[in-house]
Amino acid sequence: MTADDGFVAPIFGSAFATELETLLHWRRDVRHFERRAVRETDMRDLLRCACLAPSVGNAQPWRFMRLRSAAIRATLADHIDDASASASARYADPAQRDRYQSLKLHGVREAPELMAVFCDEAPSAGHGLGTATMPEMLRYSTVLAIHNLWLAARVRGIGVGWVSILEPQAVAAMLDVPVHWSLIALLCIGYPAEQCSIPELERRGWQAREPWPDRLFER
């Protein structure tokens, strides 16, 4: 008897396909959060769904760290603000620089949940399968887990914001993680303070979503 004996794979109909596309449209990078806490059962559900992601060699290299310390949160927020100020100098055009400085780029101070996501670059699971020529596949696998979490959060009315304006090595040192862990994301998680059908960066005139056929090439 095999593991598949008697098993019937689910069939996903057109109604589900439509709902899935709606979910993808409504996934948002959230920066404005309500203060109310996220239920612990929901947080566990998000992590469980995240860990259903595919991974190279089934290595499951994602490592999630929930940041509970108020002192760490404050230090991270100050670090991100400093990095953002430095990043604004990249924009030679004064108007674009002013637009950049007007954007709210993170919710680290107010989001009820703060989570750092690392990739274990030397996991024992997976036995190195698929990484000999592309070791970065471990990081890509971790990104897929984050995307799973993001979609699972949106289904539950929970928002996620991915903070990337930071120095990964500085944050890793701040959180005292093993040397073979690489920071992939700092996530702000909580209930959005507002809902809008148009993503914030598009609404604020920073960048609209471009037509997907423009990203397709053939050889």
Image (tube, rainbow, N blue to C red):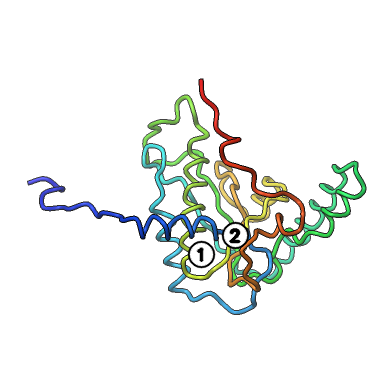
181 on left or right of 2: right
Find out whether the residues at labels 2 and 1 contact each other: C-beta distance under 8 Å.
Answer: yes
Task: Name which of mark 2 and mark 1 comes first in the sequence.
Answer: 2
Say what secondary structure mark 1 lies in. Answer: helix
Residue at x 49% of width, y 28% of height: 134
Q: Position of residue 9 (x, y in %)?
A: 22, 52
The three-letter code of the residue at mark 1 reads Arg
Near mark 1 (Cα within 10 A), the count class, few <14, some 14-19 or many ≥20, is some
Residue found at the very far right of the displayed protein: 94
Locate residue 28, reporting x and y percent.
59, 59
Amino acid carrying label 2: it is Arg
Taking the view exactly as shown, the residue that stands out farthest to the left is: 1
Q: Is residue 82 left or right of residue 149?
A: right
Q: Give the residue at mark 1.
A: 154
Q: At which x and y percent is residue 57?
A: 37, 37
Q: Is residue 82 left or right of residue 59?
A: right
Total numbered labels placed on residues in the image: 2
Residue sitting at x 50%, y 44%: 120
Quarter of the view holding residue 36: bottom right
Return the residue found at the far top. 219
**Picture coordinates of residue 117, whole percent (x, y):** 55, 53
Mark 2 vs mark 1, CA separation in Å: 8 Å
Which residue, as the protein is rendered here, is positioned at the far bottom?
A: 36
For mark 2, what is the residue? 28
Q: Residues within 10 Å of mark 2 (few under 14, many from 20)?
A: many
Q: Mark on residue 30? A: none
Residues 15 and 175: in front is 15
